[in-house]
Image (cartoon, rainbow, N blue to C red):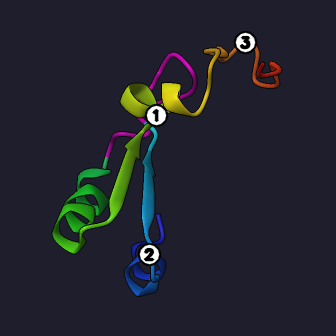
Amino acid sequence: MDVELLASAQFALLVVHDDDVREYAYTDGAERVRATARREGWTTVSVKDDWNAVLKERPTQEEPGAPHQ
């Protein structure tokens, strides 16, 4: 994760890949960047908890290119 790049941005959005149903959950070692996001006031989006606002259907790992309706 490029913490330095996000720290210099005007708007920082951190996508937390924490959904092992849709993809591999990249949670190991992610606490450093999540702590930085909280401290810096970055917008944080959880794939597991927030992505339904973006994706109407839940593609699975077996269907990485599944079309979204």
Q: Nearer the viewer, residue 44 or 32?
A: 44
Pinpoint residue 2: horizontal percent, then vertical percent: 48, 71
| Residue carrying label 2 | 6
| Residue carrying label 1 | 47
Total numbered labels placed on residues in the image: 3
Front: mark 2 or 3: 2
Left or right position of 54 against 26? right
Q: Amino acid at mark 3?
A: Glu
Residue under the image location 44 percent in, 75 percent down:
6
Left or right position of 34 against 68? left
The disc at residue 62 is: 3
Pinpoint residue 43: horizontal percent, then vertical percent: 35, 58
Q: Amino acid at mark 1?
A: Val
Snapshot quadrant of residue 63 = top right
Q: Is residue 64 magenta?
A: no
In the image, is residue 19 above or below residue 60?
Answer: below
In the image, is residue 60 above or below residue 7?
Answer: above
Q: Main secondary structure of the magenta part?
A: loop
Tell me the quarter of the image containing the C terminus.
Answer: top right
Q: Nearer the viewer, residue 55 or 59?
A: 55
Q: The residue tagged with tag 3: helix, strand or loop? A: loop
Point out the tag, 2 or 1, that comes first from the N-terminus.
2
The part of the chain drawn in magenta is 18-28
Mark 3 packing: few (<14 Cα in 10 Å), some, or many (20+)? few
In the image, is residue 67 above or below residue 8?
Answer: above
Q: The residue tagged with tag 2: helix, strand or loop? A: helix
Point out the tag, 3 or 1, that comes first from the N-terminus.
1
